[in-house]
């Protein structure tokens, strides 16, 4: 269970594969602390991705050639592209002292820790990241129901409507409160599909639902 006293960092990455030594090419973070939520989205320069060692299937599934600003041969205005040496301290700062929240967050923290190590930085996030899926299952079980096995149905069991795969999604940043039987105020903001709009690829599942499920669990 996340420590309510610690900031939360809802984290997800797109990587060059699932192999050991994979590199993150896109990093998305929502950091929530006493000052409220802040959002970060960046891409890592292709010079630092070791693409010859990348998994072609993984790149295809994550939409690398359609979405990375340098791969799609379009101006690199959004997301901003940073060399790995620049991205590492940014990630270090955004995750400092935070509890990491995500879907199978170890997948993300493992490759980010490798990136930080390459630039002489040690991870400073809290030990024991929070897995949104496990939090969701626990919330459903606490209500006396059997959790569904697929993420979409599980999300609906928690009262969270999965976003449609469109040009923009609705991102809720405050807890719904339905799983724990509480009430809360909802707030939302519209973003393009490149920012957290990866539901259909199954990689950024954490960020569209973590604002409901994980925050609800910590109050």
Image: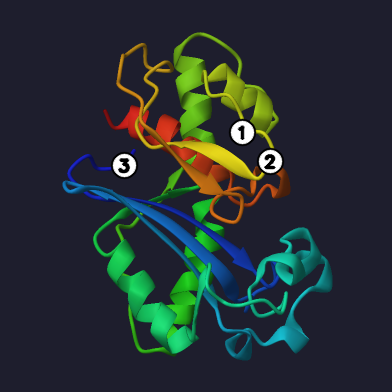
Q: Are marks 1 and 3 in contact (CB under 8 Å)?
A: no
For the point 70% across and 40% down, the residue is 165
Q: Secondary structure at mark 3?
A: loop
| Of the two numbered discs 1 and 2 in the rendering, the one whose residue sits closer to the viewer | 2
Q: CA distance from mark 1 to mark 3?
A: 25 Å
Q: Which mark is residue 166?
A: 2
Q: Residues within 10 Å of mark 2 (few under 14, many from 20)?
A: few
The answer to which of marks 3 and 2 sits earlier in the sequence is 3
- Residue 31: x and y, percent? 32, 53
> Residue 215, located in which quarter of the rendered image?
top left
Vertical order, 200 against 64 (above or below): above
| Of the two numbered discs 3 and 2 in the rendering, the one whose residue sits closer to the viewer | 2
For the point 35% across and 74% down, the residue is 90
In the image shown, does 131 or 48 lie closer to the viewer?
48
Q: CA distance from mark 3 to mark 2?
A: 32 Å
Q: Write down the residue under mark 3.
A: 2
Vertical order, 65 against 155 (above or below): below
Vertical order, 19 against 34 (above or below): below
Q: Which mark is residue 209?
A: none
Q: Write down the residue under mark 1.
A: 163
Q: CA distance from mark 1 to mark 2?
A: 8 Å
Describe residue 199's horizontal placement relative to residue 1 as left or right: right
Q: Quadrant of the N terminus?
A: top left
Q: Secondary structure at mark 2?
A: loop
- Residue 156: x and y, percent? 60, 21
Describe residue 78's horizontal placement relative to residue 46 as left or right: left
For the point 61% across and 25% down, the residue is 154
Q: Are marks 1 and 2 in contact (CB under 8 Å)?
A: yes
């Amino acid at each position: 269970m996340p420590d309510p006293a610690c900031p939360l960092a809802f984290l997800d990455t797109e990587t060059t594969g699932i192999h050991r030594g994979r590199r993150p090419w896109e990093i998305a973070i929502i950091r929530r602390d006493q000052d409220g939520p802040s959002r970060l989205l960046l891409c890592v320069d292709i010079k630092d991705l070791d693409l010859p060692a990348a998994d072609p299937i993984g790149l295809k599934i994550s939409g690398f050639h359609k979405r990375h600003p340098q791969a799609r041969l379009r101006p690199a205005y959004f997301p901003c592209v940073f060399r790995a040496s620049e991205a590492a301290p940014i990630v270090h700062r955004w995750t400092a002292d935070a509890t990491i929240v995500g879907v199978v967050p170890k997948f993300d923290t493992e490759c980010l820790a490798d990136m930080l190590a390459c630039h002489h930085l040690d991870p400073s996030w809290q030990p024991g990241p929070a897995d949104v899926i496990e939090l969701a299952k626990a919330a459903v079980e606490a209500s006396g129901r059997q959790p569904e096995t697929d993420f979409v149905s599980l999300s609906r069991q928690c009262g969270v409507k999965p976003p449609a795969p469109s040009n923009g999604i609705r991102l809720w940043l405050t807890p719904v409160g339905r799983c724990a039987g509480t009430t809360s105020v909802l707030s939302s903001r519209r973003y393009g599909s490149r920012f957290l709009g990866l539901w259909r690829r199954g990689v950024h599942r954490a960020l569209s639902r973590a604002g409901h499920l994980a925050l609800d669990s910590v109050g």
